[in-house]
Image (tube, rainbow, N blue to C red):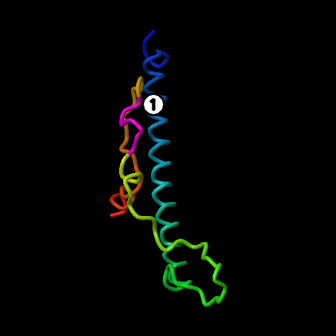
Amino acid sequence: MSGLFSAESRQQALQKQIGKAIDAFRIALFETHATIRRLYEANQRKLGQSGRRSGSRNPTARSTLSRGPLPDSISTRVSTVPRQVRHSRTKARPRIYGRRFERVRR
């Protein structure tokens, strides 16, 4: 078979649709990450300095708020996910995690 109904052309059309969907998802992910970052910073300003001690005289009182953003540890810099998926014909996109969100934001 040739033309529109060949297996190869259907595969290419499907991969093109999937690629567009992945790109749309990644854009939404970046926007959501930026929104969460803004909300986090606004909450930090509203609540005062992060990690501030409470005025409680209760010696066992502990804050459930983190003292700030988590540090960039090795777990946020190294991925164990392979760059290219085995048996995949589609283009592998760069993985986004940890500090890479900051690079994309700029």
Looking at the rendered image, the quarter that the C terminus falls into is bottom left
Q: What secondary structure predominates along the stretch shown in magenta?
A: loop
Crowdedness of circle 1 by 10 Å Cα count: few (<14), some, many (20+)?
some
Q: Quarter of the image holding residue 53?
A: bottom right
Residue tagged 1: 15
Residue type, numbered disc 1 = Gln
In this rendered view, identify the residue nearer to me: 66 or 57.
57
Measuring from the top left, give residue 66's x and y in whole percent.
53, 71
Q: What span is in magenta?
A: 79-85
Residue 2 vertical placement versus 106 (above, below): above
Q: Is residue 55 magenta?
A: no
Is 103 placed above or below 45 here?
above
Question: Measuring 38% from the left and 61% from the top, which residue is drawn there?
Answer: 72
Question: Would residue 43 appear left or right of 87 to someone viewing this image?
Answer: right
Which is more toward the observer, 68 or 35?
68
Q: Nearer the viewer, residue 99 or 93?
A: 99
40 sits left or right of 82 in the view:
right
**Residue 61 horizontal/vertical position (percent):** 64, 79
